């Protein structure tokens, strides 16, 4: 499997997670009351974000860019090198912060943050996927 295939596999998995998240009714109160739903939302966000980070790390390695010291830097490095627009990279880097909360401070996940990502930030994953597809088409 070549590098592009690995990236495409990660992209497809990320989009599967995002599709699930788009199916959730973020405006219902179920997210607060339904432990299974909330767990599924948290896990799908974690996996979608980690997939995006993995994709970024693969591109960084392939291109020989500077190594990121923290996950947020993955997106900033992609922005600095024109793989994704710098202004988009700044905003999308916030997803790494959510990933850290989901992985390390999971007992304190704020329902309002989850709601905000569900209602306002899901399209960021689609935009990221478009930029990565554009990068792959240049290869």
Image: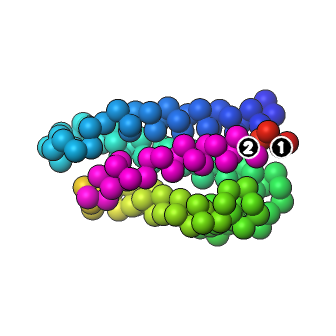
Residue drawn at x 34%, y 49% is 119
Visible residue check, residue 119: yes
Q: Which residue does the numbered mark 1 point to in the structure image?
A: 138
In contact (CB < 8 Å): disc 1 and disc 2: yes
What is the crowding at mark 1: few (fewer than 14 residues within 10 Å), some, or many (at least 20)? few
Residue drawn at x 35%, y 32% is 23
Asked whether 124 or 44 is in front, the reply is: 124
- Relative to 77, 122 lies left or right: left
CA distance separating discs 1 and 2: 7 Å
Judge whether residue 134 is colored magenta: yes
- Relative to 74, 113 lies left or right: left
Q: Main secondary structure of the magenta part?
A: helix
Residue 63 tag number:
none
Quarter placement of the C terminus: top right
- Relative to 111, 124 lies left or right: right
Spot occupied by residue 125 in the image (x, y as percentages of width and height): 53, 46
Residue drawn at x 57%, y 47% is 127
Quarter placement of the N terminus: top right
- Relative to 15, 103 lies left or right: left
Protein image colouring: rainbow
Q: Quadrant of residue 69?
A: bottom right
Spot occupied by residue 43 in the image (x, y as percentages of width and height): 39, 43
Q: Which residues are magenta?
A: 112-135
Considering the numbered disc 2 on the image, is that residue within a helix, a strand or a loop?
helix
Residue drawn at x 69%, y 45% is 132
Q: Which residue does the numbered mark 2 point to in the structure image?
A: 134
What is the crowding at mark 2: few (fewer than 14 residues within 10 Å), some, or many (at least 20)? few
Q: Quadrant of residue 77?
A: bottom right
């Amino acid at each position: 499997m070549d590098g592009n295939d690995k990236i495409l596999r990660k992209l497809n998995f990320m989009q599967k997670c995002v599709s699930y998240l788009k199916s959730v009714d973020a405006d219902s109160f179920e997210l607060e009351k339904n432990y299974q739903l909330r767990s599924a939302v948290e896990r799908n966000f974690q996996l979608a974000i980690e997939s995006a980070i993995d994709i970024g790390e693969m591109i960084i390695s392939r291109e020989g860019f500077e190594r990121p010291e923290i996950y947020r830097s993955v997106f900033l490095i992609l922005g600095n090198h024109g793989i994704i627009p710098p202004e988009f990279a700044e905003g999308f880097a916030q997803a790494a912060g959510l990933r850290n909360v989901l992985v390390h401070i999971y007992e304190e996940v704020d329902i309002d943050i989850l709601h905000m990502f569900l209602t306002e930030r899901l399209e960021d994953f689609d935009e990221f996927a478009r930029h990565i597809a554009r990068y792959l088409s240049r290869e």
